[in-house]
Image (cartoon, helix red, strand yellow):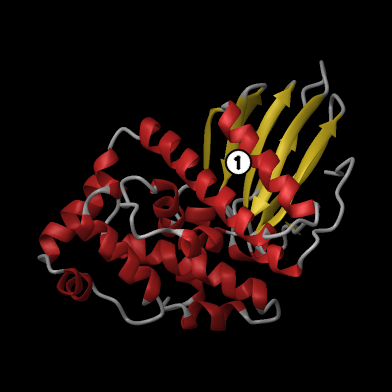
Amino acid sequence: MKDKKSPAPQSPDTQLLVDNVVVQDMPADFHFETHMHRTVELLICLSGSLVITIHGNHHQVSAGEYMVIFPDIPHRADVPCDAPCSILQTHFHSSSFSELVDRQFPMSELVFSFELSLEKRKFFHSKSSPQLVACLEGLRSELYIAQKNAQKMLQLYLTQLNILLSRDLSAHTSNAAIYENRYLVNATTFINEHYMEKLTVNEVALTVGVSPRYLTKLFHEHLNMGVSTYITYVRISKSIDFKYLNSQYPLTDLALDMGFGSLQHFSKVFKEKMGVSPKRYFSIQTVEY
């Protein structure tokens, strides 16, 4: 999608946090083919409407609504034929939030950061607010206009964005206890840090100080999957990260390095999670801004 005005950021350091904040004006019947981002995409619909298709499901984002699309999720965008659409859009790196999380905030308040660490959610769709729009406008100002302490201001706006999105996620999540259980949080954090090792349910449970049976119960209650399945999800996500940085790396070697017994097993679980085979997934255009 072409932006009507997209000047280059003033400082290369800002690229570590935010790739862009732009207003996109799209004509009626506009189509943007299936693609994916290495970043988190947040778009606020200012006028008209936009249909985002994810894994074959259509989600209409109308004026006054927003959608967050998580990293590495193939999606396409279409504007209905009856009217043009205008959106305020940003792409920021998920690592930005992990670096900015203040220890004074419990995980129950920064649930957006937790969802990013889980690497399970595909998108989030909700009503927008003047605060959210103002936050993105502030990001855009600091990103494109050379000002003193711009990097610090970007960090402050990203912290605000984290809180605003966390509020919405918490309000729209039927089982908010997932964000408050320290055993579950510690277990998912441990898995995300040690995914390349040979992990077992017993080892993870011992690390966080609970029985394997109780940990399994927590994962089923809050994540609708077992511990081993969650480990598989993390390994698939990390394999995408590695493949992106090493595009010529053979899929068979990638599967074995990430803890899968064979390419066949890797391909099977990858398709279950991403909706397409690894070969097809890595052939889809990755859009970077």
**Crowd class of label 1 (few under 14; some 14 to 19; many from 20; radius 10 Å):** some
Q: In the rendered image, which quarter contains the N terminus?
A: top right
- In the picture as drawn, the residue positioned furthest to the top comes out as 82
Left or right: 25 as drawn, with respect to 252: right
Q: Which one is nearer the viewer's eye here, 82 or 228?
A: 82
Q: Position of residue 55 (x, y in %)?
A: 58, 43
Q: In the rendered image, which quarter contains the C terminus?
A: bottom right
Is residue 76 something that shows in the picture?
A: no
Q: Position of residue 233 (x, y in %)?
A: 42, 61
Residue drawn at the location 65% of the way across and 82% of the way down: 249
Q: How many marks?
A: 1
Badge 1 element? strand
Q: Which one is nearer the viewer's eye here, 134 or 204?
A: 134
Establish if 244 lies above or below 58: below
The quarter holding residue 154 reads: bottom right
Establish if 197 lies above or below 211: below
Left or right: 99 as drawn, with respect to 68: left
Q: Position of residue 42 (x, y in %)?
A: 63, 42
Please name the amino acid that badge 1 sits on. Ile
The quarter holding residue 166 reads: top left
Name the residue that disc number 1 marks.
Answer: 54
Establish if 225 lies above or below 228: above
Residue drawn at the location 72% of the way across and 36% of the way down: 88
